[in-house]
Each structure stands twice: as C-alpha cells, then as structure tokens.
C-alpha cells in the first residue's frame, strides 16, 4: 500500500466506504451524464440502505452529483445546496439481487431530458466499482479516463472504436466487452491513459450501429 | 517499494546510515511517482488538516444518529476542574482522541489514519506536544512518516481494515503506528520505535470490530482513546528500555492470524459483540427507523 493510502485520504467522515465512496459514485455518475442532473432518483441497496442515513450516504451521493469531492466540507449540507442549485432528487431503497452490500442505483435526467442509469458499489477504502450503466454490466473503478460505448451486437464496432482512439494517440489501459444477449445490445468499456477528447465522442456517436457514447474524464 | 517487514526497514536504516523517516519517504517515491518535495508538502497538508479538525470541534455537535458528540468537551471541562485521575498530557490525549473521532462521526473533515474509524489516535498523541511547542511541524511530519512506514508493513503482512481483521487491524494498527512515532520524536532508536510498535499492537491483539447499528460511533469513538493511551504507554515502556520479546513482524503476523480466526459477526458487520447486545440492537432499531429528513 502506498504511503498516502495508509495516512490519508483527507475525507469528510464518518466512513470511507459509506461516505467517501458514495461521494465518488455520485461524482462519477455526474461525469458520465456530462452535466449536473436536473433530476435524480437515488436508490440504496443492502448496507447502504440499512445504515446509509447514519453514515450520511444519502448526503454523500447528492454531494457527488453536485460535483463535490470526498473531502468537501459541504457534504453534510448537500440537500440544501441541491435545492439551491435546482437539482431535484429523491432517496429511497431497493433490493438488488446479488449486488455488493454497498450499492447505489442512480437514475439521472439531464437538463435536456436525456437519461442515464448508473449502478455503483463502494468496495472499501473509498474505492468504487461502476457495475452497470443503463442496465448492462460494466466493471470499472472510475480511476482512469474511461470511454463507454453502447452499440448493436454486430461485427466491426470494436475495431472502429480502437482505430479511432489510436488515430488520436490515446493508449488503452484495459478493455472489457459485455452484451445483454447475442445479437442484442453490447457495451465496450475502455480505460485509457489519456483524457478522451469531446470530438472523439462526437465522431463515434455518428457511426452506424453505435447507440450511445459516454466518457468519463477525471 | 514499501517495506514488507520491520526487520528490513531497520536493516535499511543501518546500511544506509539514514533515519527511519528518510528511508520510509524514499521507499514511497518510486511507487507514488511523487517528488520528495511533493511528498513532504502532502504530509504537511495532512498534519494541517489534523490540526484544523481538532480546532473545528464543537461540543454541541451531534451525529445524525444522535449518539455521538459532546464527550471531548466533557473530558476537557472535568480535567480543567481537577476532577480526573489523569492530568496534563494524558488527559489532553484522551480529549483529543475523542475530538477527532467525534468530528468524524459528525461528518466533519478528517484524515483517515489509517482508517476513518481510527482517525483520532495519531492526532491525539501528537497535538498536545505540538501545541506546547515541544516539536515543530517539521518534526511532527517526520514522525508521521515513521507512523506511515510501520503502517505500510501492517498493510503488507496483515490488513488495516476492520472488515478483514477486526478493530485490532484499525485502532490497533493506528496505536502501534502512533507508539513508533512517539519514540521517534523523543529521539529513541529505530529499534526502540519497533519495540514500541510491537508492544502497542500486542496489547490490542484480539480487539473485535462490533459497531452498534453498523455506524462508526459506538464503540469506535472511545476505542480511539484506548488506541491513543495505549500508544503512550507502549512508547514510554520502549523509551525506558522495556522490550516485548516477540519481534514486530511476528506480532503483525499473529494479528493477521487472529483476525482471520475472528467470526465474521465480529468484523464490521454490526451483528456480534456490542452490536448484538439487547441495548445495541435497540439502538440499531431506533437509528434505522428514524427516517425522514434533517
């Protein structure tokens, strides 16, 4: 373990998993949406549902959606700040079968009405795993710049996307492929060593067979 | 690379003719990609946050559950009135441990050291010394490197997570790290730092993680006090030349073994131990039923 993982991080209490990790799930969901949500439905599962209120998990998720980092001293005031910022939100509980005990499901709506559903788990020490986007399995820690592409499950999309990245001199650190069912909907998750420029996202969106392109730049 | 044994760490000090903090700082630079200057700046920032947390403590603050807050203020008041057995440094250590741990429960900013639940131990033993001007910020930061280096060995050989090793891995490790830092500050040898570390960890071996309602409040806040006070006594023993006889690395390995043998109910699940007592369960029911806002 690195020295500043033993001493640190600086964070708003009380729990690295239930508070700091929850802020990061909210913040990652906001970045994936590409803006501050106009509306957010927050659903807590497992230990998040049982102890989330006492740990401030609800406030932490809202704080993340408002763009706060885990060490922000305004996290306890996030409900009030969300109202001031005009972000509507509800907090409830849900039972997600087979999910990690510290999981939140966020259903977000952007200013222009586009929607995104993100499922994230807080897996310890403030680290997170984004386990689903729009109902399809993903598996990334949101600690790299990440490109997420939803496409029809037909040949050629992987090479089109990787070619596009290589043309822009972006190195791929890890790559995962998922699909809902053969011939249905597929997802590529590419963790990269460089930020993903907006024009790549635009270029990919125009390709035939590509349904949705989302990027996460740290 | 971080050291994976206290023995190697002590050998490196000897062979390089360097201080513990220097050896530990250098071992992290390659891995973290930080320059020495950046690393030192980051350590100073951590210390400044520890100071700010203590200064931002308010006796009237309560946690969301209502079960945490106000205890440090009670200790400070009673100590000032001369009502307590412990006075001077010891009473201040107790109050500071409560302060930082209560701030954590009340959603204030803290430094996880090594975890959020054990965040009060290191600042508790260091803040009174710094406030009295016995050691300046430079010296305190060097001692924090020593604490972190010993903590890295615990992470490598065992764990720092209550969910894996129980409270002995969190408050126990924090206490052992603080004991080493205290001996270092007083000018003790690297070997004496290791002895203090080993004795502090030994004395908290077996401590389970049994938080009531799963919250980082009860018993976590007061466990920070035992961690801090235990660090002071282990440091004092080591400074006096007392040795623990079981070497530090073997104590860490024993802690790992005990942690693995602990029932899952006693590792941060909020099921066994104090969490499972009738009162613990009643508190859980109150806390989890209390829905609504603010």
Image (cartoon, coloured by chain):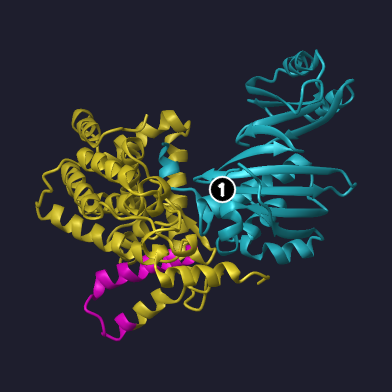
Residue range (magenta):
B78-104
Is any part of residue B122 visible from this angle?
yes
* SS type, badge 1: loop
Residue located at (25% from left, 69% from top) = B90
Q: Badge 1 is on which residue?
A: A101
Q: Quadrant of residue B50?
A: bottom left
Magenta span: chief secondary structure: helix
Residue B217, given in percent of the width and then of the height, sits at 45, 65
Identify which residue, B9 or A204, lies in the foreground. Answer: A204
- Work out whether B223 lies above or below A38: below
Chain of the residue on which disc 1 is drawn: A
* Colour assignment, chain A: cyan
What x and y, as percent, mark residue B7?
21, 34
Q: Specify whether B224 is left or right of A200.
A: left
Residue at figure coordinates x 50%, y 45% from the top left: A124
Q: Decide whether residue B28 is among the magenta residues.
A: no
| B184 horizontally vs B288: left or right | left
Q: How many marks?
A: 1
* The C terminus of chain A, quarter of image: top right
Residue situated in front as seen by the camera: A41 or A184: A184
For the colour yellow, the matching chain is B
Residue A28: where, in percent of width, then height?
68, 43
**In the rendered image, the vertical position of residue B123 relative to residue B68, given as above or below:** above
Any part of residue B54 in sight: no
Tell which of A43 and B148 is nearer to you. A43
The residue depicted at 77 percent of the width and 38 percent of the height is: A134
Please rate how many residues cluster around mark 1, counting C-alpha atoms within 10 Å: few if below 14, some from 14 to 19, many from 20: some
Task: Tell me, yes or no, whether the highlighted magenta stretch contains residue B80.
Answer: yes
Q: Quadrant of the N terminus of chain A?
A: top left
């Amino acid at each position: 373990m690195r020295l500043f993982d033993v001493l640190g991080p600086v964070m708003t209490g009380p729990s690295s998993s239930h508070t700091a990790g929850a802020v990061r799930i909210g913040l990652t969901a906001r970045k994936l949406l590409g803006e501050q949500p106009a509306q957010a439905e927050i659903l807590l599962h497992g230990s998040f549902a049982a102890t989330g209120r006492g740990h401030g998990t609800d406030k932490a998720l809202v704080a993340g959606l408002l763009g706060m980092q885990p060490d922000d001293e305004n996290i306890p005031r996030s409900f009030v700040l969300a109202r001031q910022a005009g972000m509507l939100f509800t907090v409830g509980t849900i039972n997600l079968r087979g999910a990690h005990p510290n999981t939140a499901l966020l259903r977000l709506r952007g200013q222009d009405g586009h929607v995104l559903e993100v499922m994230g788990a807080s897996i310890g020490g403030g680290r997170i795993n984004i386990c689903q986007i729009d109902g399809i399995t993903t598996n990334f820690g949101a600690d790299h710049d990440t490109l997420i592409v939803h496409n029809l499950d037909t040949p050629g999309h992987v090479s089109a996307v990787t070619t596009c990245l290589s043309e822009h001199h972006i190195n791929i650190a890890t790559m995962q492929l998922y699909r809902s069912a053969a011939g249905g909907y597929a997802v590529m998750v590419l963790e990269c060593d460089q930020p993903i420029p907006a024009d790549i996202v635009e270029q990919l969106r125009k390709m035939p067979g590509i349904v949705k392109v989302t990027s996460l730049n740290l | 690379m971080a050291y994976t044994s206290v023995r190697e760490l002590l050998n490196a000090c000897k062979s390089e003719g360097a201080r513990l903090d220097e050896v530990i700082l250098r071992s992290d630079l390659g891995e973290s990609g930080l320059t020495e200057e950046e690393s030192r700046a980051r350590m100073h920032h951590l210390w400044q946050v520890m100071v700010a947390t203590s200064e931002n403590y308010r006796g009237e603050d309560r946690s969301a559950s209502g079960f945490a807050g106000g205890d440090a203020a009670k200790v400070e008041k009673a100590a000032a009135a001369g009502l307590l057995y412990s006075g001077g440094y010891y009473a201040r250590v107790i109050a500071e441990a409560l302060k930082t741990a209560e701030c954590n429960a009340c959603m204030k900013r803290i430094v996880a050291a090594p975890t959020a639940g054990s965040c009060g131990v290191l600042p508790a033993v260091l803040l009174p010394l710094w406030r009295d001007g016995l050691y300046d910020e430079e010296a305190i930061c060097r001692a924090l490197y020593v604490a972190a280096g010993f903590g890295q060995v615990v992470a490598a050989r065992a764990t720092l997570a209550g969910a894996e090793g129980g409270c002995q891995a969190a408050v126990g490790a924090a206490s052992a790290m603080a004991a080493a830092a205290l001996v270092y500050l007083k000018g003790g040898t690297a070997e004496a730092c290791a002895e203090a570390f080993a004795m502090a960890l030994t004395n908290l071996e077996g401590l389970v993680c049994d938080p009531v309602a799963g919250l980082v409040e009860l018993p976590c806040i007061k466990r920070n006090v035992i961690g801090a006070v235990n660090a002071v006594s282990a440091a004092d023993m080591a400074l006096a030349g007392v040795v623990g006889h079981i070497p530090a690395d073997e104590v860490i390995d024993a802690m790992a073994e005990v942690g693995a043998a602990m029932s899952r109910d006693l590792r941060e699940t909020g099921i066994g131990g104090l969490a499972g007592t009738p009162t613990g369960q009643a508190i859980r029911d109150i806390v989890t039923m209390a829905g609504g806002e603010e």
